[in-house]
Image (tube, rainbow, N blue to C red):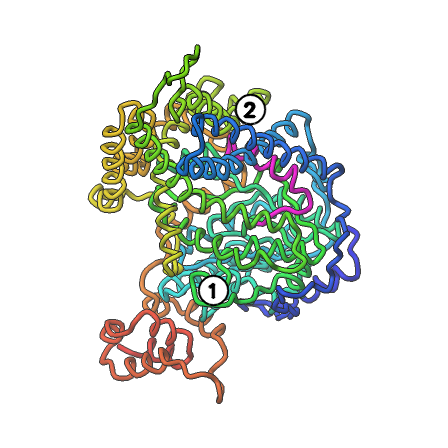
Amino acid sequence: MDVSVDALKHRTVAHDTEPGAFLPPEAPIHMPVQNLAAMPERFHRESTPETAPRGLWARRAFVFGGAIALTLFGAYEMNLVLNSEGVTILGVVVLTLFVILGAWIALSFMSCLGGFLSALTGGGLGLGITKDGPLPTLSTRTAILMPTYNEDPNRVLAGLRAIYESLVACGRIDAFDVFILSDTTNPDVWIEEERAFLALRDAMGEGARIFYRRRAHNVDRKAGNLGEWVRRFGGAYRQMLTLDADSLMDGGVIVRIVSAMERHEHVGLIQTLPIIVGGRTLFARMQQFAGRVYGPMIARGIAWWHGSEGNYWGHNAVIRTKAFAEQAGLPHLRGRPPFGGHILSHDFVEAALMRRGGWAIHMVPALIGSFEESPPSLTDVAIRDRRWCQGNLQHYKLLTTRGMHWVSRLHMLMGIGSYITSPLWLLFLLFGILISLQSHFYRPEYFGQTKTLYPHWPQVDPVQAKYVFIGTMAVLLAPKVFAFIALCFDRVDMRACGGMVRVFISILLETLLGGLIAPIAMLIQTSGVLSILMGRDSGWNAQRREDDRVPLAQIARNYWVFTAFGIVLAVAAWSVSQALFFWMTPVLLGLVLAIPLAALTASRSVGLRLRAMGLLTIVEETRLPQVMMLAIAADEASEGMGGGEACAMLRSSPMLLDAHRSNLPPARRPGDPVDAALLIGLVKLREAASLQAALAKLTRQEKAAVLASEEGVSLVTSLP
């Protein structure tokens, strides 16, 4: 294999590691905090990346021109519905809301249409990447980064082990080092992480390039976690592959995108399309079916017109370390949370800043082999969505960043819009009721004093409204139709999903349940937006990934307000007119049935029963990829291993205790800030008659602090 001098330098630095060390020698790289008010040094206003597809301007003209045309046509038709007898204030308000929401829908439709046309014409993967054929050789080193925060260590490392073994099977493991980057605050999970890490490295054999680092202070959350690694170790690696705690990637896919990064020196990031897998509840299975059947088409459309100005979703992407260090140092935003402080949704911003600095950002959605999991229930999605909502709304402060590409600004606007549209839909619904109420009490004169052949229609034209509704639904459902047609051309995947009839039934089922859930999600997102506007911070909690049964009483407590709101809306609609009530039935049904819907979709038994019937089935369930088989085997092998209380684990395993001690952070030096948690924890340990008595008094923060100090560990192991 031809290896450059620079690559050999990288390899030498990376491999010079003491046996048993948790980390390799540091290879620092400068990562300056970016000044958003000034142009970056590498900025070239007229520069177009060499990897930008030809005719990109025409693709964008097609998408935006079509979206504008559809929006104008819809606005014209809606104006006929609302203001057929003259302009009214309510009519103008509803028309304005319709135009904003219609533009959002039209842009999504045109983007998906572009993806559909690209799929039919057999567009390539881009960047010279191929699905098949021999794997390319690699000449540089890549770090695989697995950030984790209070996650189940055995579950996380089972996926990491599968990725490692997949690279071994590809014969390319020598080009990769693996880092577990822990931000865990729970001391019991922390020590279990160390135990699982040591077990993984031992299982992978002597010389396995797997490392572990825990930060004692979670500065800037995940962005700070990755940034700290880059500053300490980034100089030894040309690329880094960022993962999430539930990520899984095929070794062959990793090799192909890393090779593409090596061939194209001006590419800063290559994002894959993570396919949702492993769902067992009905909700998770709906999510993974939609993501597998509609997702590639939608993502292909996005990549088709994004070109070299793509986006970053925070994981399952290869990043050029130099580009990230040079451009992606995130500043703190002025003000207090939720809008000030560190940037929550850092991935969009990091991609935008790298593109601002002249690096191309690409997505390769047609390369299948990148996987993730879905939250098991609507409740879990709502918790995660609240944090995402805050992060996206925070981006309004970044829209004025100097030198940012207009497509990058659009990414941020679309992120903001994905949450702002929920309260706008609610306003559209409520103002629609007001218009109907106005029409109910307004008594039109169909024939005035002047004799005429045609009557004067009322202000709201019901016939025209029906046509507008049908047209809107057609645009909304078109992506699903496109995806079904595209799947019909792929007989192998169609059979793997259960055949044409089962796929069609699955689409109907997912559309029906998704439509019923939509108004609940609308209110959840609306409440999230309102709470952020009121100044409430989302915090940072570990995501629940297990699909344990949620008690019905808890579901009722969480969702009764949606049912109550649905009943109020139903009464209001019925009091205005029966026609309005029946028009609003889809929205009303979803709200009134919020509690049983949440319980039904969170059910594992219902999800597995549908799986047994061949419904909501995806390709990866009937043709299990090798990396998923490896993950299942690793997960089964780790069942019943480890767990428990941190001090007990250290006292019961001399090997774990020695490894923990040898990798403790440096002792406090004179002049360092006082660690109050450590001081209080040490006092409690010294005064305790036994370890059990001490543990009963220690807080979680104090326990973590004493386990991070040599004196604390000595006290823990010496107490009776």
Q: Is residue 692 visible?
A: yes
> Observer-nearest residue: 161 or 305?
305
Position of residue 225 measured from the top left corner of the image (x, y, whole percent): 52, 63
Q: Is residue 15 visible?
A: no
In the displayed structure, would residue 459 be above or below residue 175? above
Which mark is drawn over residue 487? Answer: 2
Q: How far apart are marks 2 and 1 (CA)?
A: 45 Å
Secondary structure beneath disc 2? helix
The nearer-to-camera label among 2 and 1 is 1
Magenta segment: 292-312
Is the stretch drawn in magenta largely helix, strand or loop?
helix
* Residue 415, image x, y percentages: 51, 48
* Identity, as a three-letter code, of the amino acid under mark 2: Leu
Above or below 142: residue 57: above
Name the one closer to the observer, 453 or 667: 453
At 43% from the left and 59% from the top, the residue drawn is: 149
Image marks 2 and 1: residues in contact by CB distance under 8 Å: no
- First along the sequence among labels 2 and 1: 1
The residue tagged 1 is 340
At 37% from the left and 66% from the top, the residue drawn is 187
The percent position of residue 545, horizontal first and vertical second, equals 38, 47
Identify the amino acid type marked 1: Gly
Which circle marks residue 601 in the picture? none
Nearer-the-camera pick, 563 or 466: 466
Looking at the rendered structure, the secondary structure element under dot 1 is loop
Give the residue furthest to the top. 453
| Residue that extends furthest to the front in the rendered view of this protein | 449
In the picture, measured across the screen, residue 251 lies left or right of residue 475, that is right
Mark 2, Cα crowd under 10 Å, few <14 / some 14-19 / many 20+, is: many
The vertical placement of 38 against 280, above or below, is below
Q: Where is residue 570 in the image (x, y as percent from the top left)?
A: 25, 32
